[in-house]
Each structure stands twice: as C-alpha cells, then as structure tokens.
Image (tube, rainbow, N blue to C red):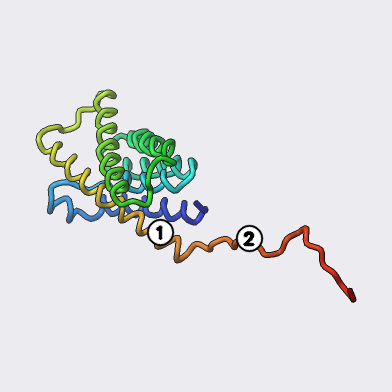
Amino acid sequence: MTLLTTIFVLGAAFLAVFWEAAFHGVRHLIGAQIDLLPALMVYASLYGSFVTILLLAILGGLWFDSLSANPLGVTMLPLFLVGFGIFSSRELILRTQTVAQLSLGFIASVLVPGMTLLLLLTTGYEPLLGWGTVWQFFVMAIGGSIAAPLCFELFNFLNRTLVHDRGGPSSFRPDREIRRGRS
C-alpha cells in the first residue's frame, strides 16, 4: 500500500464520519445510522500496513467520537482491535472474494459497536438500551456487510486510476558483457 492509498483511506474515513453526522436521511428512513468505519477498517487491515490501521483507528475513532455522543476516544480501541485481528491473519483470508468481504464487513460492523457499548457500560456511562438497540445492531451489521465490498471496489478503482505502478524488472542484466568493435 502506498502513501497515496493511505491518504485515500483516511480521506474516506473523514468523509464517512462527516456524512454520518451531517445527513440524516438514512437514519430517518430506516431508524438507524450505518457506520462505515468498520468496513474501511476491513479494507485497511487486508491491504494496508500496520501504520495505516493505527492511523485509521486513532483518527477515525476521534473523528467519530467528536461528532457523536460518545466520550472522546472510546471508539479507537474497538476499531484497532478489529483491524489488528484481521491484519494478523490476513494471509489466510481470501481478500478478493466477495463472500469474505461481506462476512468480514458483517463481523466488524457487529464487533466495533458491541465493544464500544461494552466500554461505555464498564466506564460508568448509561447509554439508552432497549429493543431499538437490537434493530440498530442489525442495520449496522447489514449496512457494514454491504459497504465492505463497495469499499474494496472504490479503492481498487482509485488505485488503478491514480496510483502509478512501479516498472517491472529491466531486461538489462548487470553481468552482461558488451563487446565493442570488431570481433
């Protein structure tokens, strides 16, 4: 992953958090807001470096918490744990398969809000819990599951379009002898 791809991921995280806070059409339509940060974390942990995961967890968590009712910094640890869990076993994951992307998006979209809720409850906060919480978890899980393959397609398109590929190996061999003059 290049530096430009890391910038794409962080920019998408910023725009996703802004979209979630500024546009309430989805929230009013289905009764819950879809969180796109876990889907972005799935992409970053499968194709990115450890630094990309760390930056996305810190910056994305701070951006999300600053525009929500969460205490500042509570979302960073769940995002990082999900990203590190996928990062540590990414050699075993079929990252190009849509089914794997859907299932990882579903799992990440359940684990991040679940761990955030657990952190809120253990630190003494009293979030509103009820039957609506189950519906919100369901919507976030399905929305994150659908958003994960879309993130993969978006970033693959951006990488094909804007990131310069490195040249292949040269046909010049350094141990080649060049004969000059008459033979």
Residue 139 position in % (x across, y down): 17, 45
The picture quadrant where one finds residue 22 is: bottom left
The answer for how far apart the CA atoms under marks 2 and 1 are is 23 Å
Horizontal side, residue 136 vs residue 163: left or right = left
Q: Which mark is residue 156?
A: 1
Horizontal side, residue 133 vs residue 72: left or right = left
Q: Which residue, as the protein is rendered here, is positioned at the far left?
A: 131
Q: Residue at x 78, y 58 (%)?
A: 175
Horizontal side, residue 127 vs residue 172: left or right = left
Instruction: Work out whether residue 140 or residue 66 is closer to the camera in this orientation and state it.
Output: 140
The picture quadrant where one finds residue 93 is: top left
Q: Name the residue tied to disc 2.
A: 169
Residue 114 position in % (x across, y down): 25, 33
Secondary structure type for disc 1: helix
Assign the C terminus to one quadrant of the image. bottom right
> Which label lies toward us, 2 or 1?
2
Residue 137 position in % (x across, y down): 19, 39
Q: Amino acid at mark 1?
A: Asn
Q: Amino acid at mark 2?
A: Pro
Instruction: Work out whether residue 111 or residue 95 is closer to the camera in this orientation and state it.
Output: 95
Category of crowding for the residue at label 1, using alpha-carbon neighbours closer than 10 angstroms: few (below 14), some (14–19), many (at least 20): few
Category of crowding for the residue at label 2, using alpha-carbon neighbours closer than 10 angstroms: few (below 14), some (14–19), many (at least 20): few
In terms of sequence position, does the residue under pointer 2 or pointer 1 come before the other? 1
Residue 58 position in % (x across, y down): 41, 40
Secondary structure type for disc 2: loop
Q: Residue at x 73, y 61 (%)?
A: 173
Horizontal side, residue 122 vs residue 80: left or right = left
Q: Residue at x 41, y 37 (%)?
A: 89
Q: Which residue, as the protein is rendered here, is positioned at the far bottom?
A: 182
In the displayed structure, would residue 169 be above or below residue 72?
below
- How many marks overall? 2
Instruction: Work out whether residue 50 or residue 25 is closer to the camera in this orientation and state it.
Output: 50
